[in-house]
Image (spheres, rainbow, N blue to C red):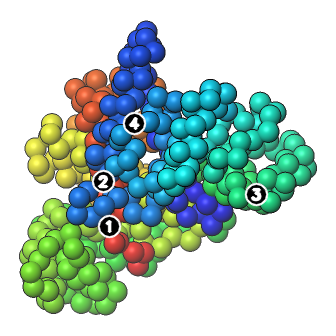
């Protein structure tokens, strides 16, 4: 979910039915279990809410509003999406009032279609953009902007519609923008910073002597700073600060160094591309890696991170995937995953893509890999949380 400045402000989680024939009571129970799962995996006793300042929009039903799992999530970070028709029930409306008083957000779906007055106790309203009715929408949304209500455009399928929605005064946008390069001045290949990173990656891929790799780092103060900042971050939990490039490289080792450089390559500044595309690449890389950890040997599961993050590199760099592969030395298995989603890594990347789109292919792809829905959910939530605390900046 983006704001008008292209900043990722949160995520929208939806539930997929695994059994269409299940009765209402069973479905409600399944949703309660899933909500509890989300609460457990995105909260930590020591560090708190793992998504930082990001909002989490959750599809809700009346039964979920009284769930104890909600109390385990920070109210200011949660927005529950209900249908306008749900509020016709007095008990549901009372539960909404209680949640709003506690600080939870409530978003209404299909409210405009209902044509009725909007309840006072809601924080967000889903609206549908229509390019052919811009003037009427402008008048309608201008009236809504006078209230404290925040408007969420859904679905916003392209950047042209995004710009129109921002002009209309909408506050947030949900669609496929996380997979789409931002039009404008586009990159036409590797910029100087990226070329330097690729040079080091190719040396690492050949297991060159660390001294030779260190010499290249010494010629790039910015890259050296990023390496030392990364190795001294809280994620490593080192008791003493590392001040030597040689020590930092030795601590990381070849595989972790290649992963980190892959991450840095994806986040290296590229004019014309949206930050959300970079964040999606990072999440996809981690998601793919976590999906395969249980089923692939350690080295291979780490290759999944590279396959996942590089699967969007063509869009980030504005070049074909073939050109990406011509510049960077990658294994045949990773190349197969990038080009055709084949080989041992391809299906994992395809599953990560399906989850980004809430595709009906999620179930079949997971089943083919013998990955359970719970494992998919855990990997996805963990990847989202991991991306928040990465601390990698554009170079």
Q: Secondary structure at mark 2?
A: strand
Residue 219 in percent (x, y) is at 28, 90
Q: Secondary structure at mark 1?
A: loop
Q: Residue at x 58, y 44 (%)?
A: 97
Report if the CB atoms under discs 2 and 3 are less than 8 Å apart: no
Mark 1 Cα-neighbour bin, 10 Å: few <14, some 14–19, many ≥20: some
Position of residue 328 in the picture relative to residue 323 (left or right): left
Which-is-in-front pick, marks 2 and 3?
3
Disc 1 from disc 3: Cα separation: 37 Å
Q: Residue at x 75, y 41 (%)?
A: 118
Residue that carries the numbered disc 3 in the rendered image: 147
Which-is-in-front pick, marks 1 and 3?
3
Mark 4 Cα-neighbour bin, 10 Å: few <14, some 14–19, many ≥20: some
Residue 394 in percent (x, y) is at 42, 75
Mark positioned earlier in the residue sequence (1 or 2): 2
Which-is-in-front pick, marks 2 and 4?
4
Residue 124 in percent (x, y) is at 64, 49
Mark 3 Cα-neighbour bin, 10 Å: few <14, some 14–19, many ≥20: few
Disc 1 from disc 2: Cα separation: 17 Å
Residue that carries the numbered disc 4 in the rendered image: 67
Disc 2 from disc 4: Cα separation: 16 Å
Position of residue 270 in the picture relative to residue 32 (left or right): right
- Quadrant containing the C terminus is bottom left
Mark positioned earlier in the residue sequence (4 or 1): 4
Disc 4 from disc 3: Cα separation: 29 Å
Q: Residue at x 34, y 49 (%)?
A: 72
Which-is-in-front pick, marks 4 and 1?
4
Residue that carries the numbered disc 2 in the rendered image: 43
């Amino acid at each position: 979910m983006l704001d008008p400045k292209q900043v990722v402000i949160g995520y929208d989680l939806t539930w997929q039915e695994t059994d269409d024939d299940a009765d209402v009571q069973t479905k409600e129970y399944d949703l309660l279990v899933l909500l509890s799962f989300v609460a457990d995996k995105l909260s930590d006793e020591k560090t708190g809410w793992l998504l930082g300042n990001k909002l989490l929009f959750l599809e809700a039903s009346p039964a979920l509003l009284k769930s104890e799992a909600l109390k385990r999530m920070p109210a200011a970070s949660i927005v529950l999406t209900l249908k306008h028709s749900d509020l016709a029930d007095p008990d549901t409306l009372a539960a909404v009032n209680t949640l709003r008083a506690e600080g939870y957000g409530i978003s209404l779906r299909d409210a405009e279609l209902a044509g009725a007055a909007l309840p006072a106790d809601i924080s967000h309203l889903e609206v549908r953009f229509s390019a052919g009715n811009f003037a009427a929408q402008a008048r309608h949304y201008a009236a809504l902007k006078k209230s404290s209500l925040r408007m969420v455009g859904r679905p916003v399928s392209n950047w042209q519609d995004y710009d129109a929605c921002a002009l209309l005064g909408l506050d947030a946008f949900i669609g496929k923008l996380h997979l789409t390069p931002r039009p404008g001045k586009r990159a036409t290949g590797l910029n100087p910073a990226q070329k330097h990173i690729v040079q080091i990656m190719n040396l690492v891929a050949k297991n060159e002597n660390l001294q030779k790799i260190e010499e290249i780092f010494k010629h790039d103060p910015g890259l050296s700073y990023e390496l030392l900042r990364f190795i001294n971050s809280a994620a490593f939990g080192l008791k003493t600060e590392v001040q030597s490039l040689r020590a930092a490289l030795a601590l990381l080792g070849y595989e972790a160094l290649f992963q980190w450089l892959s991450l840095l390559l994806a986040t290296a500044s590229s004019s014309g591309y949206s930050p959300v595309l970079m964040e999606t690449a990072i999440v996809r890389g981690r998601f793919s890696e976590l999906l395969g950890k249980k089923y692939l040997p350690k080295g291979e599961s780490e290759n999944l991170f590279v396959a996942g993050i590089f699967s969007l590199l063509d869009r980030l760099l504005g070049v074909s995937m073939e050109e990406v592969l011509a510049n960077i030395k990658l294994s045949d298995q990773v190349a197969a995953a990038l080009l055709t989603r084949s080989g041992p890594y391809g299906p994992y990347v395809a599953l990560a893509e399906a989850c980004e789109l809430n595709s009906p292919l999620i179930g079949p792809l997971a089943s083919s890999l013998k990955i359970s829905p719970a494992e998919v959910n855990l990997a996805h939530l963990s990847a989202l949380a991991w991306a928040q605390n990465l601390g990698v900046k554009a170079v």
